[in-house]
Image (spheres, helix red, strand yellow):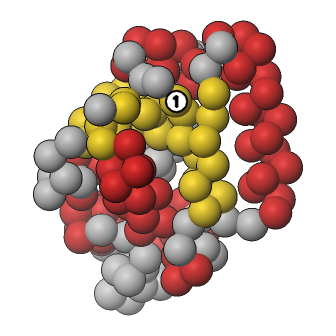
Amino acid sequence: MTTVLIPGSFDPLHLGHVDIVEQSVELFGNVVVGVLYNHEKPSGLFTPDERVELASASLADLPSVRVDKYDGLAVQAAVSAGADFIVKGLRNPADFDIEQQMAHMNHSVAGIRTVFVPCRPNVGFVSSRFVREIAAQGGGVDHLVPKPVAVALADRFPASLR
């Protein structure tokens, strides 16, 4: 069975991410969701440990998926995870442009190939940034994120309109 790494900040994990994970399980079998962070740049809505916890809870029904955190480059995480490939989800042509450049760079650095998986149209518009902004302003995001993330966002932004 092939093992792939899906790297990202996942701050927070949303249904677009879940879609790519589910498709990757179907295509490859074993999936490592790599929560990447830079300990020299503490930032984000959730800490790396909280992101791992939320992703693990959100993906608990997928037994061939594990969630780990990694400090450093995606290719370093892929090697550490024992991944055969990196998987990147694509929402639009702009995603392809930047992801292709990163894929070529990652291959030149570590020899690890990247596979692009297009997200399903019903989640192609979702981004972590938009989820954070909407939740912070009191908007409902329950239809955009898994239940554990929705609960965490409601706790983080108690004045929300949920």
Residue at image coords 46%, 57%: 20
From this view, report whether residue 66 is shown above or below residue 56.
Answer: above
Return the residue nearer the eye: 87 or 8. Answer: 87
**Residue 15 in which image quadrant:** bottom left
From this view, report whether residue 153 is shown above or below residue 57.
Answer: below
For label 1, the crowd category at 10 Å Cα-Cα, with few meaning under 14, some 14 to 19 and many 20 or more, is many
Residue at image coords 70%, 22%: 106
From this view, report whether residue 69 is shown above or below residue 129.
Answer: above
Give the number of marks. Answer: 1
Residue at image coords 43%, 76%: 144
Task: Locate the C terminus and report the quarter of the image it occupies.
Answer: bottom left
Query: What residue is disc 1 on?
Result: 85
74 relative to 107 in the view: left or right: left
| Mark 1 residue type | Phe
Residue at image coords 21%, 42%: 64
115 relative to 37 in the view: left or right: right
Residue furthest toward the front?
Answer: 1
The image position of residue 16, as x and y in percent, is 48, 65
- Residue 50 shows in the view: no
The image position of residue 135, as x and y in percent, is 46, 73
131 relative to 62 in the view: left or right: right
The image position of residue 114, as x and y in percent, is 63, 34
Task: Locate the N terminus and report the quarter of the image it occupies.
Answer: top left
From this view, report whether residue 41 is shown above or below residue 12.
Answer: above
| Mark 1 residue element | strand
- Residue 138 shows in the view: yes
**Residue 101 in which image quadrant:** top right
